[in-house]
Amino acid sequence: MTLGRSGRAWRVSSRVAELQVVLEGVPLPASKQQLVQHARGEDADPGLIALLEALPEREYPSIDDVGEALRPVQPSSEPGQPQQPKPESGLPPGGEAYTDASAEPGAVRERGPEG
């Protein structure tokens, strides 16, 4: 039986949860090296230590930040371009202004959609 993406994601999430338990009690904020040393001191599984060693070199203010660096669950805060409606959807409410990224939020347009 082969695991697909969701199977792999579940395994990684499970390992991250295990790692967060191992890191309980580490003085925070902590550098990557301090996290690795703490895990070794807790006799953590070598696979968990390998996850920590794969972390970017920086200071981690919380155990949740370590988990987020290994398996992001929070949505990206970068604003993306709005998706264009599919042709079969017809004109969206508000017409062209519906997908106008430069439109001022809450501003009243001089004229409404035609149609």
Image (cartoon, helix red, strand yellow):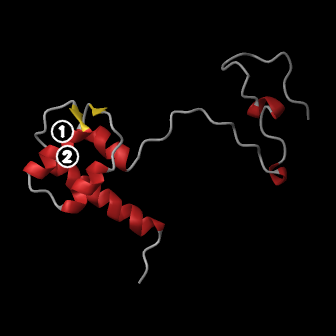
What is the quadrant of residue 111 in the picture?
A: top right
Quarter containing the N terminus: bottom left
Q: Residue lying furthest bottom in this view?
A: 1
Secondary structure at badge 2 equals: helix
Is 44 positioned to the left or the right of 94 in the image? left
Residue at image point 79% right, 40% down: 92
Q: Position of residue 26 (x, y in %)?
A: 13, 38
Image mark for residue 107: none
Residue 30 lies, with reference to residue 1, above or below; the image says above
Count of numbered badges drawn on the protein: 2
Residue denoted by label 1: 34
Is 65 positioned to the left or the right of 43 in the image? right
Q: Nearer the viewer, residue 72 or 51?
A: 51
Residue at image point 66% right, 18% down: 106
Q: Position of residue 67 (x, y in %)?
A: 31, 46
How far separated are the C-alphas under marks 1 and 2?
5 Å
Is 69 positioned to the left or the right of 107 in the image? left
Q: Position of residue 36 (x, y in %)?
A: 19, 46
Residue at image point 21% right, 52% down: 19
Q: Nearer the viewer, residue 114 or 22?
A: 22
Q: Could you tell me the amino acid type at mark 1?
A: Gln
What is the quadrant of residue 43 in the picture?
A: bottom left
Is 89 positioned to the left or the right of 114 in the image? left
Residue 26 lies, with reference to residue 111, above or below; the image says below
Q: Residue lying furthest right in this view?
A: 115
Q: Nearer the viewer, residue 33 or 98?
A: 33
Quarter containing the C terminus: top right
Image mark for residue 36: 2
- Is label 1 in contact with label 2 (beta carbons under 8 Å)? yes
Q: Could you tell me the amino acid type at mark 2?
A: Val
Secondary structure at badge 1 equals: helix
Residue 90 lies, with reference to residue 110, above or below; the image says below
